Image (cartoon, helix red, strand yellow):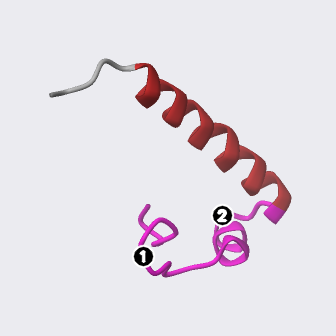
Amino acid sequence: MKHGYYDTPRECSLTELATSLDVTKGSLSRVLHRAEGRIIKQFMASPSQE
């Protein structure tokens, strides 16, 4: 979040974020994909807040 990856427009690319975290782009992509999937599944399973 602090690097601006989720800002619109993005403040940094996946490559830049991976470099700053000292991980490979592929590893970061896999970790983010899994985390985003878990968040979305949890959100979709939650009762509506009407």
Q: In the rendered image, is residue 24 in sight?
A: no
Amino acid type, mark 1: Thr
Q: Main secondary structure of the magenta part?
A: loop
Residue in the image at 19% along x and 27% along y: 49
Q: Is residue 7 magenta?
A: yes
Residue in the image at 30% along x and 18% along y: 47
Please state which of residues 37 and 25 is positioned toward the viewer in this rendering: 37
Residue 19, image x, y percentages: 72, 73
Q: Is residue 35 magenta?
A: no
- The mark found on residue 32 in the picture is none
Image quadrant where one finds the N terminus:
bottom left
Classify 7 as above or below 39.
below
Q: Quadrant of residue 24?
A: bottom right
Q: In the rendered image, is residue 4 in sight?
A: yes
Residue 12, image x, y percentages: 56, 79
SS type, badge 2: helix
- Residue bearing the label numbered 1: 8
Residue 28, image x, y percentages: 73, 55
Left or right of residue 48: residue 30: right
Question: Which segment is the magenta one?
Answer: 1-25
Please state which of residues 40 and 11 is positioned toward the viewer in this rendering: 40
Amino acid type, mark 2: Leu
Classify 13 as above or below 48.
below
Image quadrant where one finds the C terminus:
top left
Disc 1 packing (10 Å; few <14; some 14–19; many ≥20): few
Residue in the image at 63% along x and 70% along y: 17
- Residue bearing the label numbered 2: 21
Give me the C-alpha separation between circle 1 and circle 2: 21 Å
